[in-house]
Image (cartoon, rainbow, N blue to C red):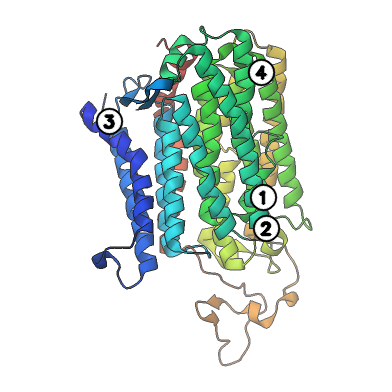
Amino acid sequence: MTVIDISASVMQFLLAFVVVAPLLGAVAALLPAPPGLKGKNPDQAVLRHGVTVTGAVLIATIVLAVGFDHDHPATMQATTDISWIPALDVRIHLGIDGISLPLLLLTALLTFLCALYSYFKLPAGPSPKAFVALVLVLESGTLATFAVLDLLLFFLAFEMVLIPMYFLIARWGGGQRQAAAWKFILYTLLGSVVMLLGILLIGLKSGTFDMVALATDNGRGLTTSVQVIAVLAIGLGLAVKTPMWPLHSWLPDAHTAAPTVGSVLLAGVLLKMGTYGFVRILLPVAPDGMRTFAPYLAAFAVVGIVYGSLACLALARTGAKGDLKRLIAYSSVGHMGFVLLGIATMTPTGVNGALFANIAHGLITGLLFFLVGAVKDRYGTADLDTLAGATGAALYGRAPRLGALLAFAAIASLGLPGLAGFWGEMLTLFGAYSPAEGLSRPAFRTFMAIGAFGTLLTAAYMLIVVRRVCMGEHTPHSRLSPDDRAPRTADGPEPSGASGARPAATTPRLADIQAYEAAAWTPLAALTVLAGLWPAVLLGLTDPAVQKLLAGGKS
């Protein structure tokens, strides 16, 4: 069933447009603007160009989803297959199924919302032209990663995002941005070198780099030893990008230093590339190798769940001078641990849970980083002890709508039933209860118990954050300065009036959610609720594709 019947050639064009248009838009952003499009402010003109290009890509992706045959989500659709390098049998092979389509939509949506947000709130840094071009190159590389069906093209797209993200952190980031950017690029590049060796090994031993053919073969053309080596090599590269504990240490530094939109794209989109590679490449192409490493992958995953939560609890405690952006980054280590645990079960239930958790994490953590960026802009800091405030009522009293939305995002992140975060975690734990044949049930049930304990830790630190940031720490009002007692307006503290004084208990006000912030954040909040209340929309896409993938290309 398709919502609108769209011809195969138009679907092909739309998918190619989605991948190539951001790249062409990046080139156009660097060129001098035509006289009629310069406007009075060239900087705003190029930011408007970014909104236009990402908006066009989002519309094309939505049309692609509308024309997608939802009765056959396991079938590759909108496919293009053109010979590119005949000597190596490398082809420009594009296509989407129920696994990749949600990730395409998530990428296009988050990038558009980041471009819209940046139009009104551009981070401090060099030329806006370079900023827009880098965001568009990043979008093109990410969309290509989810759309290509050739191993070498996958590797090129996978690497394409590293340079723009490096510069977004290094040139538009905050404190310690150079060190964080170098750490990001070194970790990911070293992981990618090892991953390339694994990809070449598979291609040379099987005689093809075509991901569809390799998935259909289901490892039958590769010996067990080749599969084990390939999974180890490719898995290391993917694990760095995910990131999996203990290869995660670049992530907190990168998030802390990155500008708001950089953090949103890094958490919401880039981390998904690693887990997508596990599902799209390693599970169907090297099943014997994955079965060998699955217990170890699950063990690292649950350690990451508990470690990330304990790190967040340490940052959240009073007096720790914890950075809220850093705390959300560590929470991502835990959430991606659930995704890896689901993949390690090698069952349809677990893998579906992993894919659902991927999308939920992109929506919720993207919203959290937007909100933390807004809080940092208003307070001038993301330090939790400072954000707790000295008034006894921080965000709820100063910016009620902002505080309420932050509390909503935090509750969604801890996996409250009825919101998107719940289903992914629940399904991965169900998958761990009954893993694939050949995997140790006692071991995976132990991992399930540890993962379930991690959900309790997640609830603990998220509720502490809500209490401290939204409610504040209760201290005597006498510690407030006269300026703090006056409500803050756009032009500074409000005049005291004829008496020259205000009641000591008055809570200082901050700017609440602005119109452009509401426009950027509302879709994420709405989709978080929709995915939580109606999970069948997403699971109906992923489940048939996952069943076929795990069955070796047989529906």
Between 38 and 271, the one lying in front of the other is 38
Q: Are marks 2 and 1 in contact (CB under 8 Å)?
A: yes
Q: Is residue 524 visible?
A: yes
Label 2 close to label 4 by CB (< 8 Å): no
Q: In this image, 368 relative to 84: left or right?
A: right
Q: Circle 2: is it few (<14), some (14-19), or many (20+) Cα within 10 Å?
A: some
Q: Mark number for residue 253? A: 1
Q: Say which residue appears at 59% left-offset and 56% top-offset.
A: 170
For the residues marked 2 and 4, what is the alpha-carbon distance in whole angstroms? 36 Å
Q: Which quarter of the image is occupied by the C terminus?
A: top left
Q: Amino acid at mark 3?
A: Gln
Crowding at label 1, few (<14), some or many (≥20) Cα neighbours within 10 Å? Answer: many
Q: Secondary structure at mark 4?
A: helix
Give percent across and percent down for residue 269: 50, 41
Residue type at tag 4: Phe
The amino acid beneath tag 1 is Asp
Q: In x, y percent, where is residue 32?
A: 33, 62
Residue 12: which numbered mark, if any? 3
Give the SS element for disc 1.
helix
Q: Which residue is mark 2?
A: 176
Q: Which quarter of the rendered picture does the N terminus lie within?
A: top left
In the orientation shown, which residue stands out farthest toward the bottom?
A: 498
Q: Are marks 2 and 3 in contact (CB under 8 Å)?
A: no
Which amino acid lies under the numbered mark 2 shown in the image of this protein? Gln
Residue 71, image quadrant? top left
Q: Earlier in the sequence, mark 2 or mark 3?
A: 3
Residue in the picture at 35% in, 19% down: 75
Q: Residue at x 45, y 51 (%)?
A: 135
- Read off the residue under disc 4: 293
